[in-house]
Image: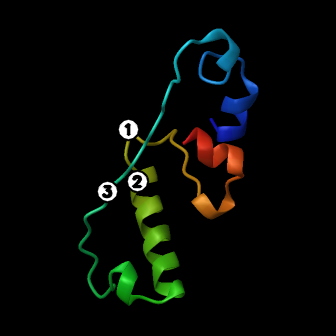
């Protein structure tokens, strides 16, 4: 499932006319990590951050619970998609 498929599917989440109160869907991951030889984001360069992201995505995708999950970089989202999150 992608954010665009969520937006294109009629549901209470996207149909504000049918609901009297706002529905908020928020996801947040706080990642505590210990990757040998890798700096934390504030001290790393862009290439190191991209490498850490790739390693983490690969590890998460290898878990049974997250095999069918999806992830997206906030910088790649439209304004509407950001509001949805």
Q: Given this view, does label 3 or label 1 mark the residue nearer the observer?
A: 3
Residue positioned 50% across, 69% down in the render: 54
Residue positioned 63% across, 64% down in the render: 75
Q: In which quarter of the image is the N terminus?
A: top right
Residue 34's label in the rendered image is: none
Cα distance in 3D space between marks 1 and 2:
9 Å
Q: How crowded is mark 1: few (under 14 residues within 10 Å), some or many (20 or more)?
A: few
The residue lying toward the viewer, choosing from 40 and 16, is: 16
Q: Earlier in the sequence, mark 1 or mark 2?
A: 2
Residue positioned 39% across, 79% down in the render: 41
Cα distance in 3D space between marks 3 and 1:
17 Å
Residue 65's label in the rendered image is: 1
Q: How crowded is mark 3: few (under 14 residues within 10 Å), some or many (20 or more)?
A: few
Query: Looking at this rendering, what residue extends furthest in the right direction?
Result: 8
Q: Mark 3 points at which residue?
A: 30
The answer to whether the residue labelled 3 contacts the one labelled 1, judged by CB atoms less than 8 Å apart, is no
Q: Is residue 32 above or below residue 34?
A: above
Say which quarter of the image contains residue 37: bottom left
Q: Is residue 9 above or below residue 69?
A: above
Residue positioned 33% across, 84% down in the render: 38
Cα distance in 3D space between marks 2 and 3:
13 Å
Callout 2 secondary element = helix
Residue 85 locus on image (x, y percent):
54, 42
Q: Is residue 33 above or below residue 35?
A: above
Callout 1 secondary element = loop
Q: Which of marks 3 and 1 is nearer the N terminus?
A: 3
Say which quarter of the image contains residue 31: bottom left
Callout 3 secondary element = loop
The residue lying toward the viewer, choosing from 63 and 72, is: 72
Query: Looking at this rendering, what residue extends furthest in the front direction?
Result: 20
């Amino acid at each position: 499932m992608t954010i665009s498929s969520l937006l294109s599917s009629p549901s209470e989440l996207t149909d504000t006319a049918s609901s009297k109160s706002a529905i908020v869907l928020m996801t947040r991951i706080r990642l505590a990590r210990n990757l040998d030889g890798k700096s934390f984001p504030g001290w790393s360069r862009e290439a190191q951050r991209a490498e850490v992201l790739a390693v983490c995505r690969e590890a998460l995708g290898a878990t049974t619970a997250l095999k069918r999950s999806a992830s997206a970089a906030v910088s790649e989202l439209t304004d509407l998609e950001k509001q949805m999150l």
